[in-house]
Image (tube, helix red, strand yellow):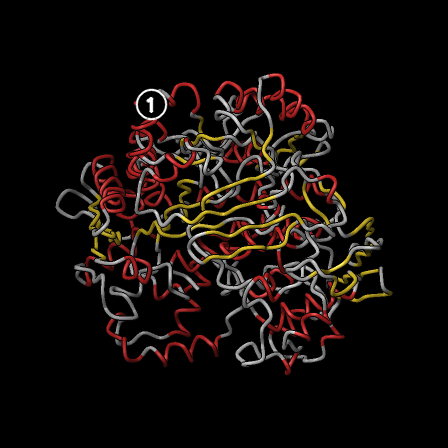
Amino acid sequence: MKKTLAMILALVLALTSVSFAFAEDFDVEAYGVTSSELYNAQLGEFYEAYMAGRSEVTNLSLRFALMAIAEAKLMESAMYVPGSSNGGNYAIGRVAANTATSALWGNDSYRYHDVIIVNEDPVTSEQWNAMKTAWAEKAGTGTYEQWVKDYLTAEGYTFNTEYALGYSSDPKTWDVLATSRAADSEAIVNTYDGLVEYDMENVMQPALATEWSVDETGTKYTFKIREGVIWVDSQGRKVDDVTADDFVAGMNHMLDAMGGLEYLVGSDGGCGIVNAQQYIDGEISDFSQVGVKALDDYTLEYTLEQPAPYFMTMLGYGVFAPMSREYFLSQGGGFGEEYAADSETYLYGKDPDHIAYCGPYVVTNLTPENTIVFSANESYWNKDNINLQTITWKFNDGQDALKAYNDMKANVIASAGLNASALEVAKQDGYFDKYVRVSATDATSFGTFMNINRQAFANVNDGAVASTQTPEDAARTKQAMQNVHFRRAIAMGYDRAAYNAQTVGEELKLASVINSYTPGNFAQLTEDVTVAINGVDTTFAAGTYYGAIMQAQIDADKVAIKVWDPTLEGGAGASFGFDGWFNPENAKAELAIAIEELAAEGLVIDAEHPIYLDLPAYVASTTYNNRAQVIVSSIEESLGGLVKVNKTEAQTGTEWYYAGYYTDYGYEANYDLYDVSGWSPDYGDPQTYLDTFLPDYAGYMVKCTGIF
């Protein structure tokens, strides 16, 4: 939700008890004005290019090209330096490659009904690679699943109808419409079907919707709901028919529950369903004014405020899940003012026995911190076309570093990631060379933020993680951080591979290194597009990836960073797996420009007058402290000691998070550099990333740069 000035002023007044973190004359209104000025100066080119792309809603290829140009400007600003994604670690197991969707957004990758599991030894690394190669050739043809079964049968395998996997956190609720917690939604998604679903070849397939259409305005979507589908309880007994009204009831309940993902349907960062934002904000209370309607029992309609070409890609999220209205009411539920989740009579979602099921599985056993069993739903409309009859989650608290590996060997669970301890044992067992492979990375982007307008010099909640900078140091640092060449020097002087090695080891240090905010392969042109690159009309052919266009703009601007390597992934190209930023010589060159420009402003940087940067470090953790030390040593070495990085010590993870991650506004950011935040996509459009750098308190991540 967008923060208004009144909201900000109210928060500042509430912070008077911890005002030691700010200058005594801190003026939040003046801060907002300064934020706007700094945003325009540092991110103005990004914003102008991005809004041009965002406003293009008819030609998706043109839209993606314009957004790639905008992201190039964001990367060149060095306000945010991409670091790493999830994945890229060693793994081993009996799961066939690419038999759950690898779509980079939504919850469908946790729908396991089509996953293929073998009974015998783990699949070998050679077999894994063969499957990956075949998937790349067959994706989109509808033939990969049968090919995998035929291939593994020929390799001597038989198939298991149970998928056993480890988990580390019990769901806190079984109401998918009232949570933003991954541990909840990853479990519940196996209990219901949505309108559509991505298959293992990443093709969107009908699920509860049999067909759909969008009108000529691009704002009205109509879905025909599959007839004959029923809701059952945890005992498999019918409780209701699935109808279009279930999606209306689900949306109503989701907006009442405010579980944390409601923004996805609002106007601020979402698809903009008519009046959804007004309902969220309390401006209207009549849900019938919200743009989701059941036109009849089996016709559903969504109406948007304006075209959102990514709308269909959002439907895999729990916010669009159906819910039986009658069953919900029978469990003490209510809508609008009658919604009271804290009532003693409210039972919905409290456990798996108090939800209705219309998906492939029902929960037949839940033993907290032990086992969760999902058994095939005998009434499921597509029960004859699933590969697994049972999914069993087995709890692992992480205390035994070898438990997952040993359980995988014993076929207690199907697969396991390998930590450092397990990796060594796998090598001793002779498993490493034959069975171990590197897991795929996902679309999460973790990175380092640069604070260009620092106001807080201790945590605003309790004064921890205090800076030792003098007022003069702080003023010099702020002035330097507002120079783009200084920020680029920091970005190019930071050894991200060595940083990553502290977590995944030296062998895999580059595997999950990323070089852009939006993955370069996240979007691809479907037709030839001509756009202006620095005033020169440039044509990109159909099939060109987003990352290649981003790189073209960066190259034209002569900024020495590499965000896309066209030779990787078998020639398809990639934005991960290499460090396209770290280069001490380039860092020194950028610093030299910064020193000259800042000298003209009266700021001297030399051996006697270095710039001091504060980096919060969780010193109680060996891994995190070592990662912070890599940032310190690599920047100081790359820049010849002209920049000094201080580790401001956090004794607990909570203190570390309160230095930046738990903050709501840029003026609370207690750092000059910070590496404890990231973003993952909500839907299949670069807008899901780039919106987070919008100005005026609208962009979720821009606060990490010390503004808004």
Q: Residue at x 71, y 61 (%)?
A: 237
Q: Residues within 10 Å of mark 1 (few under 14, many from 20)?
A: few
Q: Residue at x 63, y 26 (%)?
A: 135
On the rendered structure, is 461 left or right of 340?
Answer: left
| Amino acid found under the numbered disc labelled 1 | Asp
| Res. 590 in view | no
Looking at the picture, how far across and down is residue 655, in whole percent?
A: 27, 61
Looking at the picture, how far across and down is residue 41, in whole percent?
A: 45, 54
On the rendered structure, is 659 left or right of 120?
Answer: left
The vertical placement of 290 against 429, above or below, is below
The vertical placement of 150 against 66, above or below, is above
From the image, tell me which residue sits under label 1: 429
On the rendered structure, is 543 left or right of 424?
Answer: right
Looking at the picture, how far across and down is residue 63, in whole percent?
A: 67, 44
Which residue is outermost to the left?
Answer: 608
Quadrant of the image containing the C terminus: bottom left
Quadrant of the image containing the N terminus: bottom right
Q: Residue at x 71, y 34 (%)?
A: 526
Residue in the foreground of this view, choosing between 562 and 279: 279
Which residue is outermost to the right?
Answer: 296
| Res. 73 in view | yes
The vertical placement of 255 against 132, above or below, is below
Q: Quadrant of residue 362?
A: bottom right
Residue in the foreground of this view, choosing between 702 and 108: 108
Q: Quadrant of residue 465?
A: bottom left
Residue in the foreground of this view, choosing between 542 and 412: 412
